[in-house]
Image (tube, rainbow, N blue to C red):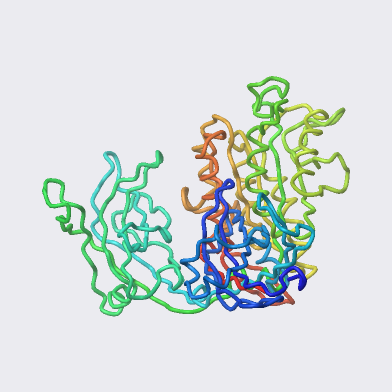
Amino acid sequence: GDQEYFFKSNPIVVVYSSNDGALEEIGRTEVIVNSSSPSWNAKIILQYQFEVLQPLVFHIYDIDPQFHEVGEKMLKLEEQQFLGEAICNLSDVITKQNRLFTLKLGVSEHNLPNPSKFGELTVQAEESAGSKALMEMVFHCSDLEIKDLLSKSDPFLLISRMSENGTPVPICKTEVRKNDLNPKWKPVIMNLQQVGSKENPLMIECFNFSSNGKHDLVGKIVKSVAELENMYHSGNGENFFVPASNAHDCHSKEVLKSQVYVEKYLENSRHTFIDYISAGCQLNLMVAIDYTASNGNPRLPDSLHYIDPSGRPNAYQRVILEIGDILQYYDPAKRIPSWGYGARPIDGPVSHCFNLNGSTYQPEVEGIQGIMSAYISALRNVSLAGPTLFGPLLSTATAIASQSLTSNQQKYFILLIVTDGVVTDFQETIDAIIKASDFPLSIIVVGVGGADFKEMEFLDPNKGGRLESSTGRVASRDVIQFAPMKDVHGMCFSNAVFDVILALEDKSFCFHVSCHLYNICSLSPAYDFAFLTFT
């Protein structure tokens, strides 16, 4: 800090999370007595979530000597002298070299005695060791109850840890197994930080999937990780139970004949997303926008492409802003390849992959605002046409990822495709997806508008069947995530966007660095934990 400003102060740092301007305290450091350049030892623990922005606010106070015997948590901050504040996102710290980020201290509504003299606050992030300790398990069930009238059940598992007040907190879930009463799921991976300890109870619930989101409970068990490990070694199953429907005692339960087994249990450690970002690995966003005629006349208010004079974003703009604002923090250059598809440029044939900025050779624009400007400009310079084809887009994006791989660049690409309709080049799209799975690329497809996107679920292996190319090849990994955004003006939209990005957690990305194949990590480290320290 500034030595003159902090001369003989007794400073403390108070850390807040910020949600739409409302502050919630996360933690406090200790008080450093009589210091002009304090360095605090306290570590503030918070959960790092890749899929959301996490604004942090730091307040520094000078603690009056009469309160030095009072514990930090008991101090009344309104009775102390305010020295300054700093604001950043957690991702600002995570993405910096050595995870060190220096902030200028300023002032908001507080009245300072010497507002021209502030200092600096350096924040350091350190990853919790528990984030690296992994437990991998494979579950299977037998004799599940039939829940559907015309077919077998479509089961999936939801695993939650039990909070101190008994409320389940979801940790992870499996994929949906269609028409299967004896399902075996892909491995689920949890870290020790998520579950707290191997003795903490976990709730494992089996649901029958429903497309309306109202999934039927098939049964559940409550077991600790240690007990699940014992189930694996013994080979014994555990009977599901459900709350008794006709019992007066809320703790009564009905034991079912259906059983769950732990077929595999493995403990290991991993390199995390934070490790690779800190080591220089970059995420690079790419964007593609649907300019087919089914979007409606952009000049009319009922069009999905209507540019509202009031500034309220349309469906396409909101998707790009919501997802782009999160991903751009991990793209230092913020040079974003941006394309349109399904339109006819002036005096030309229909193009299924044209540069939004109008350039013949260069598709990149500057940041999210560059996408917004190029998007609006293209609406004035093309005629909406069709059909909806993904093949050319995917091939172009894969070529960029391939070139980066050939150059030994530590980059991973995320292609965001926003569409209002169902693709018509099904097989070409599948062939392109399977080819893309060999390169450092993941694909997010977001459906906007009121179309029936049921047919698009074939893109997502977790909802549809296995993708197979025209030559019989299957994807080397899960590479694509699809989600329709039915409500583009409500809270449902934001939650759905987070779900889309979070779903990439299971799509581990692999690519060559220095001629060696590295399994980099899960793309979305939704439960990595960070310690913050301050100087």
Question: Residue 259, located in which quarter of the rendered image?
Answer: bottom left
State whether residue 394 is above or below residue 278: above
The outermost residue toward the front is 66
Residue 72 percent coordinates (x, y): 50, 70
- In this view of the protein, can residue 474 be seen by the observer? no
- In this view of the protein, can residue 137 be seen by the observer? yes
Q: Residue at x 54, y 50 (%)?
A: 498
Residue 181 percent coordinates (x, y): 29, 54
In the foreground, 391 or 341:
341
- Image quadrant where one finds the C terminus: bottom right
Residue 279 percent coordinates (x, y): 70, 74
Q: Residue at x 52, y 78 (%)?
A: 129
Q: Residue at x 65, y 58 (%)?
A: 89
In the foreground, 162 or 8:
8
Left or right: 48 with respect to 361? left
Residue 150 percent coordinates (x, y): 29, 39
The outermost residue toward the top is 300
